[in-house]
Image (spheres, helix red, strand yellow):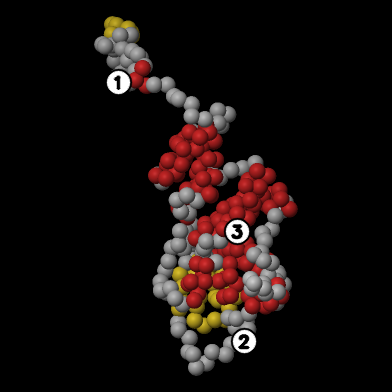
Amino acid sequence: MPPKLAPKSSRRNRLLSGPLVKIEVGSGTDKREWSIHRNLLAHHSSVLAERLSGDEPATPTSPHLQAPIGDPNTASSPYSAAKTQGNLHTGTFQTTEQRPNHTSHKKNAHQLSDNLSLSFADINPEAFSLFVKYLYQGTLTPVLGLPSSSHWPYAFLCQQLYSLASSLRMPALQNALMDQFRQGCHAAGLVPGADEIALVYKSTESGSEMRKLTSQIAARQIMDPDNEREARGYKECFEISEFGVDVVEAIRRGVGGVLLEDPMERRGCAYHVHDNGGRCGEERKGKGKDGILKKKVTFQK
């Protein structure tokens, strides 16, 4: 017979027991700290489970970091909420490990762990607060329930947190963030610009669904005849080679395989260089340096 599942209350007690892990997020004046249950972190992410087990080297790492558990907004919550806007880039983190003294291992259920800590220097503390909410509640605040003025800012936070969820191998959180991001963009009538898309490509791995989405957004913007934004508006993004490939593939899929004009069949002086403009063999009236008509100039074939 298959083993019986532990009661929800038993699982909840287990996840909210044990030592707390100190987590520093952001840098400079925007830096914030949280203390989160180690069991809860390990439950949601296999990557963190390995890091926090002490089996992995305690060196800076760049990994390409569900059930409702408690309420993070209560006064008894073991962590604090951050409200400061910051910047998210790579989602890198490091662990600092000090082997515990096994002769004195008795700890209070909510005592701060003295052997492990995490640092996410490049993460926006406000975006991380959504991460903490998800850990303890198993859900995100619905963007459509927020004031209209908050739709885009909240969507952007979800975009930022997506890279962290991806690096920590948390697909359920990635999917929840993707849904909130798309709904927020649609409700706000806005899409990511070149800066935001470049940020996605710099902080996610090849094949990321967020890359797929944002490259398709860029392709649609470029191909929209009513949109004044030209391809050169994404110059920063095109410096990332994979973005160019993804956009071309998106355009190819979007136009349904339409065959373009064969450039080899163009006649006349196509692709010739003309010093004074015009076409080969075309007569033009030339002017001297004083601007007075002097003679006719004929372009040679």
**Residue at 47% across, 49% down:** 207
Mark 3 or mark 2, which is nearer the start of the sequence?
A: 2
**Please, what is the three-letter code of the amino acid marked with disc 2?**
Asn
**Please, what is the three-letter code of the amino acid marked with disc 3?**
Ala
Can you tell which of label 2 and label 3 is closer to the viewer?
A: 3
**Please, what is the three-letter code of the amino acid marked with disc 1?**
Val
- Quadrant in the picture for the N terminus: bottom right
Mark 2 or mark 1, which is nearer the start of the sequence?
A: 2
Q: Which residue is mark 2?
A: 108
Mark 3 or mark 1, which is nearer the start of the sequence?
A: 3
- Quadrant in the picture for the C terminus: top left
**Residue at 50% across, 38% down:** 250
**Is residue 37 positioned above or below 282 on the image?**
below
**Residue at 29% across, 15% down:** 289
Give residue 293's position: percent from left, percent from top.
32, 7
Q: Which residue is mark 3?
A: 172
Give SS at disc 1: loop
Q: Distance from label 1 to label 2 (Cα)? A: 80 Å
**Residue at 28% across, 6% down:** 295
